[in-house]
Amino acid sequence: MTIHYVSRHKIAVALGMTPAAIQQRHNAGTMPKPDAILHGSKTSEWYGWKTETIEKWAPTIGRDVDWSRTGK
């Protein structure tokens, strides 16, 4: 079974927000912890979230998720 994760960019598009706004929420710790670290190094890490995680979180910030905006 393959598990699919979405990036901060796809989350932003699906929520109708800017990638910078999602980055700020992530840095501030006001969004769910990532479900996975997809790539990591000392200088950067790429995070991934399950769609279910974002679908549970979105209503808490007054947003609806529309994955069709992402081409998913």
Image (spheres, rainbow, N blue to C red):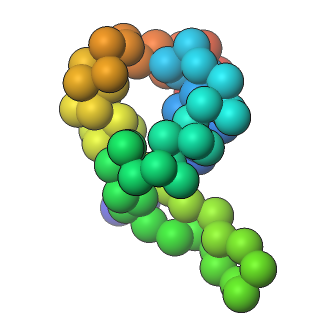
Image coordinates of residue 19 in percent, x first then y, are: 67, 33
Q: Is 70 left, or right, of 32 in this rendering?
A: right
| Viewer-nearest residue: 41 or 72 | 41
Task: Please determine whether, in this image, residue 55 is positioned above or below residue 47.
Answer: above
Query: Would residue 14 be seen by someone viewing this image from the given angle?
Result: yes
Residue 40 location, quadrant: bottom right
Q: Quadrant of the C terminus?
A: top right
Task: Please determine whether, in this image, residue 9 is positioned above or below residue 42.
Answer: above
Q: At 33% across and 49% down in the image, what residue appears? A: 32
**Residue furthest out toward the bottom:** 42
Q: At 58% across and 69% down in the image, what residue appears? A: 38
Image coordinates of residue 56 in percent, x first then y, are: 23, 32
Task: Please determine whether, in this image, residue 59 is positioned above or below residue 40.
Answer: above
Q: Is 8 left, or right, of 57 in this rendering?
A: right
Q: At 57% across and 13% down in the image, what residue appears? A: 16
Image coordinates of residue 4 in percent, x first then y, are: 46, 51
Q: At 49% across and 41% down in the image, what residue appears? A: 25
The number of numbered badges drawn on the structure is 0
